[in-house]
């Protein structure tokens, strides 16, 4: 398992099966042990401890909780990229071609 800080209380986790997901951990920051994690600077001090994401004060979030409570990375990321694209450019086809230059499926753009 690998984990990367994204923003706010969001962590992208790559599981051993290769699946990537994003967790918004704010919903789990309840109780005295999680209180220090509400400080975003302290929240970013997480590390992998076995199969959990843990913090120096002893707080942790188990793998099962993370896996079941996370967004699929690819869908979440695509929605964010699509929203940004629409705001910045009217040419979605060109933007997608830049994102996926190796795509050999010319129908990909028609299915959107």
Image (cartoon, grey):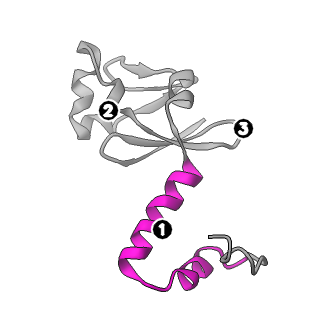
Q: Pointer 2: what residue? A: 26
Front-most of residues 6 and 81: 81
Q: Quadrant of residue 31?
A: top left
Q: Which mark is residue 17?
A: 3
Front-most of residues 17 and 78: 78
Q: Pointer 1: what residue? A: 82
Left or right, 67 with respect to 29, comes to right
Q: Residue at x 58, y 77 (%)?
A: 96
Graded by Cα atoms within 10 Å as few (under 14), some (14 to 19) or many (20 or more), the crowding at tag 3 reads few
- Give the magenta part as a residue range: 73-102
Q: Quadrant of residue 55?
A: top left
SS majority, magenta: helix
Graded by Cα atoms within 10 Å as few (under 14), some (14 to 19) or many (20 or more), the crowding at tag 2 reads few
Element at badge 2?
A: helix
Indicate which disc, 2 or 3, sits on the residue closer to the N terminus: 3
Residue 94, percent across and down? 56, 85
Element at badge 3?
A: loop
Residue 74 in magenta stretch: yes
């Amino acid at each position: 398992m690998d984990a990367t800080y994204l923003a706010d209380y969001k962590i992208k986790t790559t599981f051993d099966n290769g699946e990537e997901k994003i967790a918004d951990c704010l919903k789990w920051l309840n109780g005295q042990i999680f209180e220090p994690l509400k400080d975003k600077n302290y929240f970013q001090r997480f590390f992998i401890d076995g199969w959990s994401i843990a913090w120096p004060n002893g707080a942790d979030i188990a793998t099962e909780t993370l896996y079941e409570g996370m967004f699929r990375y690819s869908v979440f990321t695509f929605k964010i990229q699509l929203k940004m694209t629409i705001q910045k450019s009217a040419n979605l086809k060109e933007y997608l071609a830049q994102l996926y230059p190796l795509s050999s499926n010319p129908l990909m753009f028609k299915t959107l």
